[in-house]
Amino acid sequence: MSVDHVYDLMARAGELPYGEAKTVLVEDALRQAEAAGEPELAFRVRMELTTAYQYGGEPAKAFTTFSRCLSDHDREPGRFDEERRLLWQIKWMVNSLTLFPEIPLDRTYAILDEMERRYQLGGHSLQAVFHYRHAVARHVGDAGAADEWYARWRAAPRDELSDCAGCDPTGMVYHLASRERDEEALAIAGPVLNAELNCTEQPQGILTALLPVYLRTGRVEDARDAHRRGYRIMRSNIADFADIAEHIEFCALTGNEPRGLEILQRHLGWLDRAPSPHSAMRFAAAAALLLRRLDETGHGGEVSVRRPAHGDRKAADVPAAELQAELTAQATELAARFDVRNGTTYQGDLVREILAAGPIIDHLPLTAHDRRPTTATSAQAATSAQAATSAQPVTSAEAAAPAAPARRTVADYSDVDDLDALLAAGSERWQARDVDSARAAWQRFDKVLASTGAVLSTAQRAQRADGRGLELLLSGETEAGLAEWRRAAELYAEAGDPVLQHSALSRIGGALVGLGQLDEGLPLLTTAVAYLDEHAPGTRRALTARLRLSGHHLESGRPEEAVAVLADLAPDEPSDIGDLELNRAQALAHLGRHEEAVATLRRACAALRTAGDREPVAQAAFMLGQLLSHDPAGLDEALAAFDETLANAVLPALRLAAHAERGKLLLSSERAADAVADLVEAVAGFTAEGAHAQAAHARLELAAAYYTTGRHFEAAEVAEEAAPILTQLDDTAAERRLRYILAHSQRELGEPQAADLFTELAREDDDPGAAAQLLETAAEVLTGLDKDALAAERFAESADAFADAGNPYGVVRTRRRSALCHLWSGREDEALTEMERAKVGLKELPPDNPAALTWESSMVAYDEARLLANLSRYDEALRSVGEAIEGYTSLNETEAAEAARRLRSSIQDELS
């Protein structure tokens, strides 16, 4: 086996995050080092493997590698000299031993004693020893010993073997939090939160420890931020499984059960391969608490959790109640095992406390758009009410939205005793869309009738049946409401009033058509229209019947017929004019006659403003804003139209759509900061109403607005919220745009996942030029994270794509950068090869742009000089840097030329 291959494996492992992929490479490197007969190299690899196991979520495996390394060092300390690292790693062993109930506690105490002996022998502070004696005392629930060791830990001087400046205070915060000494915990944590830490476990560790402290002290904004930041960092690392449980518990205690369920769903599969029984116990207990809270808030019966396959168990959707019972039993059983091992009830007490915990805060919003869902009326009721109270066509989107009553002052009829006057008032208020006042009139009618025992005429019975039908439809009793309207039509006929009879039939037909029952509804509607046109021409009843028929044509994809139905109508009343023009504008817009539609909508808005009809004004203004949004010259008018919508709209669906459209318009107009408020409102409202598809698209726009304004954390969080829904909707374009935003946000946050996402996007792109740019960006992310071997591969892949796209400049640039990344990752031969390919690429640059050719040639020469100098080939390096200086100077690129001169001086110093 080649020693070089061992080094190569370790270099590749060094660029991967802790986890299975990294561990597999280190294990392979150890096997090859042992096979090559290189014990010193195998020792160093084994030391790295202990670290990989520790931070990769396999602490049980670290026992073996650590013991072997310690034994080798003790046997031949001069040959296997890693004493400081071994003294550091022994702390991990002490902590990990407590996490496995099958390991006797005596063994942990023995390792602690050995740790103390070695620290004293090396002249080190015992601060870390006191720390871990405290940790064991806390684990078994010995409060007195924990307090004593804590005091000694705090008093002892720190040294190089103390936990880092973030982890040491984290342990202290956990102790103080368990004693509810919250102000002391905050005082210790303060300096850490403001520090720049270079530690695998921070800042997520201390943020998680502070969660209960923040909640108990009322620092809810700090609690929210600690949860969001801490969980985001740890969510991809199974080693943090126990800490993730604390975030689930946090969600359960702050009214964020849906967020907690999302986290549970994401990590449930890890329970089958938990790093330790202790972490499994903590996760099971927190998850059971969350599922209990879901049930208590009325959502448990609706929820199933997808559990992935494991071993012989197939993947399945598990009902929440069943999973809660299973997880409760698992947590309780594991706690009992720890208690038997420890000789105390402490771990069991902790689990029972978690399982029984109640909310600390009713609801802590985690984002600006985080609101609790409201109960919506049924789609059927909304459809029927819209058909009954408005002359506007009912669209499927409106049918799915809950209808709210108009916010008007309800008329007072308490002193009216005349039955005919009350029926007239109800009819008049209905026609004016003031449904609450109409109800008040009808309710007063019923009360007066009951008190007087009057005998109603057929006409009075018909009018009351008409009103009762509307009331039933508004309350969601569709069939009962339509039955009352049918009864009203029969009574109107019996009373000798065929106009009112056909008006009622028109409403019945419109409602049935809106519900999709065309076979029955459409004949009723068309018959009523024909009758009213002939016998009541020019009346509002004839107009509204036509509007209903026009709306049906529009919904059925026949806008020409919709326009024709409205062609010869010329009402006088402002409300009628507004209704007519709004319907006509909708048909014109469907026909693509946008200029006519805009002019028609302006007339509709003017008429409806005069009539004082708020909801129709809002509908007309919204449509006007939508049409004007496509015209850059119409920006101000479009924004004003959306403002008018929001000032008048009562229906939640329309208000939220206006916020969404206004936000999109502001975003597209380079006013992203102004767009945020509207988009936040849209996301919050759509989510609360259960309109998940609309909420996902609004989140997409909000993520874009956040990214554009430099709020990259919020952009990434919102994008990740939207991603699953857009994937389910199979909206490829929106989903891809979202992933672009997420990738760029992750890049700005320094998250390594950005490189993977840019690479995925590149490999899905059929355009080689676009793919090349995405691969180059992925490489830039990787080299920025010091993952230069991977970066070199991405730059080379980008160069190939640039070649396919016919972009020779891109080829030269990425070959050159690939060469440097190979150099920085210790692959000198590959670096030289790539630099030669970059030089060959210079010959492919077009000769008609000499300045560009000189610039690229100078860049290649400069970087080649850096490469050759690193290989101690100084004479060649001087020639190359001289070419770079000459080229930069000819282009008057003074800064670049000066940098090249500094490089030449450093090379000359090496030669001298």
Image (cartoon, helix red, strand yellow):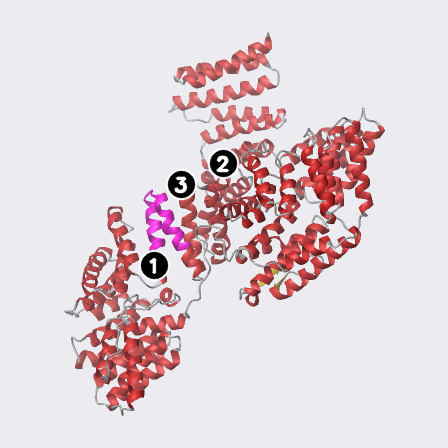
> Mark 3 — residue?
709
Q: Is residue 298 left or right of residue 179?
A: left
Q: Taking 779 as reference, is 611 above or below it?
A: below
- Name the secondary structure under disc 1: helix
Q: Which mark is residue 655?
A: 1
Q: Residues within 10 Å of mark 2 (few under 14, many from 20)?
A: many
Mark pair 3, 2: CA separation: 21 Å
Q: Which mark is residue 777?
A: 2
> Magenta: predominant secondary structure element?
helix
The quarter of the rendered structure image containing the C terminus is top right
Q: Nearer the viewer, residue 90 or 794?
A: 90
Question: Disc 2 residue type?
Answer: Thr
Q: Residues within 10 Å of mark 1 (few under 14, many from 20)?
A: many
Residue at position x 45%, y 19% in the image? 896
Query: How many numbered markers are drawn?
Result: 3
Q: Earlier in the sequence, mark 1 or mark 2?
A: 1
The label nearer to you, 3 versus 2, is: 3
Q: Residues within 10 Å of mark 3 (few under 14, many from 20)?
A: some
The stretch drawn in magenta includes residue 763: no
Q: Which residues are magenta?
A: 655-683
Residue at position x 48%, y 41% in the image? 745
